Amino acid sequence: MLLVLAAWTMAASRPTSDSAWILDSLHWTGAFVAAAWVAWRAARAADGQLRRVRSRFALGMACLAAGQLSWDLLSWAGWNPFPGIPNLLYLLLSPCFALGFAATVGDRMPGSQWKSAALDIAGFGLAVLAFTLALFLPHAVRRSALEFVVLTAYPVLLLSAAAAGIVVQLHLRLRPTAATFAVLAGLAGYGALWTAWSLAFLDATLRPGTGMTLMFSLLALLLGWGVANWRPVPSLSPRYDRLCEALLRQIPLAMVAVTSAAAGFIALGDRLPMQARPPLRVLFVLALLCAVVRQTQQLRDRDRLLAAERAVAEGRAQLHHLAHHDPLTGLPNRTLLRDRVTQALATAARRGEKVALMFIDLDRFKEVNDTLGHATGDALLCHVAAQFTLMLREEDTVCRQGGDEFAIVLTDVDSAAAVARAVERVMALSNRRATIAGHELPLSMSVGIAMFPKDGEDFDGLMQCADTAMYRAKAAGRNAFRFYDPQMNVEASERSRLRWLLAHAIERGELHLHFQPYFHLRSGELAGAEVLLRWTSAELGPVGPNQFIPVAEDGGQIVEIGAWVLREACAQVATWQRQGLALPAVAVNLSILQFRHGDLVQQVADALRDSGLPARQLELEITESVLMHETDKVFATADNLKALGVRLAIDDFGTGYSSLAYLKRLNVDKLKIDQSFVRDALASPSTTAIVRAIVDMARAMELEVVAEGIETAAERDFLAATHCAMGQGYLFARPMPADQFEAFLAVRAAGPALAPEQAAADRSGVFPLAS
């Protein structure tokens, strides 16, 4: 750089001396050789595809340096014709860079996208050629055709190479870096510089020591630095993706703009030879034709994209409705109820209003199912749902929680007395009889009511209070309603005791793991096992997961417990592997708190390293609710987990928020269909449709599917017929402690599976795979 500036300064200070051109040549030579050397060293230091790209760029820089050296040699010899060998070497700079951009693409673009990119570059090149000819022809009266072709080729090839780089960047969604800007700015700058140089050459006004001569050296150094640091960096940002699409749509407009500018020069100028006008018009037509064809392609692609987006939107809407409404009664399910209650509470808080949440349970409904059959029970549920809908206001919400439980949200209520009147209308159903399939059935129900803001300020708090009040109504003899009273919440002290005991469960060795296998439905081969946590308290005895897991999540202890489960599960499976007991995969459930707190990625990495378990054998299961909280952090954590090599699965799929965009972004490997869908799949056409929709969607997204809670051969056969890959449930095996599961693996490793009668008698709960 110092040599360049020193030589140019000396030339600029004495532009009329004989040594001025020699000094300009000196700093050109130094800059070109230095840039080529830097680019070549960086190319040799790279490997793979990056080395191929940099090598082609470096070859272009070498041609530039060789051209300048040959120009110096010929000038020193006193014989330097134009055009000559130096000019040919200069011209090779652009093709080398174009080949480098093509190597950047490699096999990352389909054939149709290649054609689009080629059309973009060709159209822009034709437009630039037309513009350059419109500029140069009025000045080319005293020049030979060969000289004019070479002078025209300089800017056209350089600007076309810059356009190729921009098109490749946009099509591949490569994130712009400083090196990218250096290379593209260097090529475009050289194109503009050669345009000015050629015009000055045609008009015989070239002078040494000018800013233009300095820019040749500076742009060469910029190109060399850009090539040395060139590294394609793909961007996954949806916002950047949309920006690239928008810029690609502007390329045909750029072709039209440049061609129109060229036509304007011709129309306004009077020095253009008449014989040159017809070829230029043909060139204009070709450039405009490329723009029209490319614009037509873009419109066709846009139409296809819009059609695909509409199809996806319709599918998502159908899935959303199926997943947020009860398939039997058509009422909102618990997920949609949560949304409605949350909105109602927010509105009530702003307006200072009250909201009532009623939790309703049909008394002795099980007797109806047991004595008259599930079809009669389902008809009764539909009748009750219809009656609830008819007697309530339009702004109120009726929801089926599942089984024989309903919930009603009353908004804009001014007092408990107004709620009591509404509840009495609901309870009036208890004095009626419903005629279902020729049977007269009494309607008896127990109702619990919680009020906002007195009893709770969120959905979960109100639901817990209403549930507590409902059980108090049942305890009072059923067919009654109760408002929530804080004294009812006697279990709060029990939860505090659970929380304290759970805090010491790990150090006391009270936690242990059970393993429930899952199988390939068609072959019956073992596919893996899910890890289930069990707690045997010294004071309380066995405590169910549905009791202590919520307590652990409420108190934040789930983070420490989850890390312990990860370590123990990986260590146990690795031990079995060393003993020759093969287990293809082990699935561990994660809590949302593990994503929010603690270093989950480091915990997983440590567990894999300490145990020696291959990362591909570890599956981490998350629920859909995880995707709805702190999505950026969840996605970042998931990306880091995938980088470790572990697999991700969505557990209880269909019970939460099903976002196709989130599933695609999260890059999951497996979906686990919730057992509630499996249980109702054969009894309810709507549930059948949900299961088929989930399996078809998963297959389209190339995801594996595991159905949970399979208890009958009919359920297994139905799922296999829908192309569900794997199944898990009591039909195959119950959860087993580690020692029993080890024996189970040993039996499978030793020979054929147990006979059905042996399996049924086995207390470990292993059931036959054959019906």
Image (cartoon, helix red, strand yellow):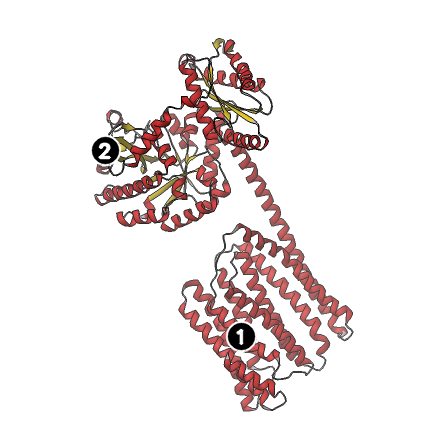
Quarter of the image with the C terminus is: top left
Q: Which residue is mark 2?
A: 740
Q: Is residue 294 above or below residue 41?
A: above
Q: Amino acid at mark 1?
A: Ala
Q: Nearer the viewer, residue 710 or 219?
A: 219
User: Residue 508's spot in the image, x, y percent?
Assistant: 24, 36
- The answer to which image quadrant residue 478 occupies is top left
Give the residue displayed 44% in from the left and 73% down from the top.
40
Q: Is residue 703 above or below residue 292?
A: above
Relative to 102, 277 lies left or right: right
Q: Amino acid at mark 2?
A: Gln
User: Residue 104's spot in the image, x, y percent?
Assistant: 49, 62
Q: Secondary structure under badge 2?
A: helix
Count neighbours of disc 2 (C-alpha within 10 A) and say few if under 14, some if 14 to 19, many if 20 or more: some
User: Residue 395's spot in the image, x, y percent?
Assistant: 59, 25
- The answer to which image quadrant residue 421 occupies is top right
Count neighbours of disc 1 (C-alpha within 10 A) and say few if under 14, some if 14 to 19, many if 20 or more: many
Q: Examine the rendering and report whether any part of residue 155 can be seen.
A: yes
Between discs 1 and 2, the one toward the N terminus: 1
Q: Secondary structure under badge 1?
A: helix
Relative to 533, 315 lies left or right: right
How far apart in space, not on screen, are marks 1 and 2 (Cα)?
Answer: 72 Å
- The answer to which image quadrant residue 131 occupies is bottom right
User: Residue 291's spot in the image, x, y percent?
Assistant: 66, 58
Give the residue displayed 33% in from the left and 44% down from the top.
618
Give the residue displayed 62% in from the left and 70% down from the top.
156
Q: Which residue is mark 1?
A: 220
- The dot on residue 98 is none
